Image (spheres, helix red, strand yellow):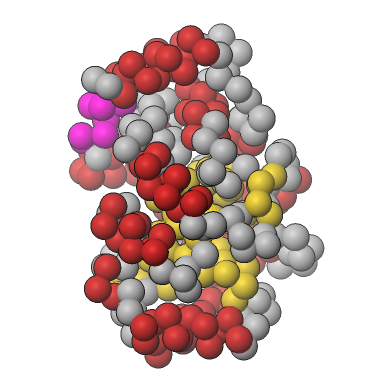
Amino acid sequence: MRHRPLGRTGLTVSEIGFGCASYWGLSRFDEGEAVRLVHRALDLGITLFDTAPGYSRGEAEPRLGRALRGRNVSGLVVATKVGTFHAGGGRTGRDFSPAAITASVEASLKRLGLERLALVQLHGPAAAELNDDLFAALERLRERGLVAAFGANSFDPEVIAAVIAAPSLDVVMLDYNVLRPERVALIEAAAARGKGVLAGMPLAMGHVDGQIRKVRGLRDLWYAARALKNHREELALAERFAFLRHLEGMSAAQAALAHVLANPHVACAVTGTTRLAHLEANAAASGLVLPDEVRMKIYEAQQG
């Protein structure tokens, strides 16, 4: 596993990160299997683990804490989020007030079993919520030694631009994959300001790999239902990149990850999985280089 600096934070992260969310975090997914995936990720050299209090109906963050119990976490970047939370009944609540942000960080530290969080990200803030009171609260947490670096996770270009411009925010996490070439300009702007860049959804929710056609159990049905409900446009767009499913020497998922990591300003591609084989294949994408002809075909497909 190769590693890259996370902007000017002083942190170093693995090129592939482990997303601790979605089906992985739900109680219906076997705890032992979930823990084994985290332990295997550690063995593979993965050092960034991304989660949030509201992920998986509030079950993902404490599960990650249990998975890391007894392990050496000194070299890890355990990243969580603030501003959203599980409000019960499958609902997500929002609160970006300074008091809520402070309470959220303190609660996350307990759930994760950590004394300090390497990275805390604002989870889908509105541009208007990025105000001086919020930034002052973040700096107080930093001064208390509870958080090393702050960032924000957003898929809204306006918000991402505001995050890039904010001196108190060190990292931006955005949706960057073969379906999102327009994100390159934002990534370059972030890098120019010294921000670390994390690529969320680097596999485009598995659409490029055609995962929706590979239903083998309940977990696959869960992801397929979510895709059909929320990502029909991405499903259609991904078919332009179906040629990636027929490459020699690498899977479509590995090619998609290699494309994301070909951008030198991306520190880490964060992807989740519930299968050991997928985890190992994703990790093997670190260091892969796409042939020129594949890069050209991706470019042509992106132009429509």
Residue with the most extreme front position: 192
Quadrant location of the C terminus in the rendered image: top left
Residue, x 48% and y 81% (percent of image)? 138
Instruction: For residue 121, say whether it is visible.
Output: no
Q: Position of residue 16 (x, y in %)?
A: 60, 42
Bounds of the magenta segment: 232-238
Camera-nearest residue between 224 and 114: 114
Task: Say whether residue 151 is magenta.
Answer: no
Residue, x 76% and y 65% (percent of image)? 74
Residue, x 57% and y 46% (percent of image)? 268
Q: Position of residue 113 (x, y in %)?
A: 65, 75
* In this view, 19 is above or below 120: above
Q: Position of residue 179 (x, y in %)?
A: 33, 32
Q: Position of residue 32 (x, y in %)?
A: 63, 53
Instruction: For residue 9, say whether it is visible.
Output: yes
Query: Toward which corner of the image does residue 224 lie, by quadrant?
Result: top left
Camera-nearest residue between 165 and 286: 165
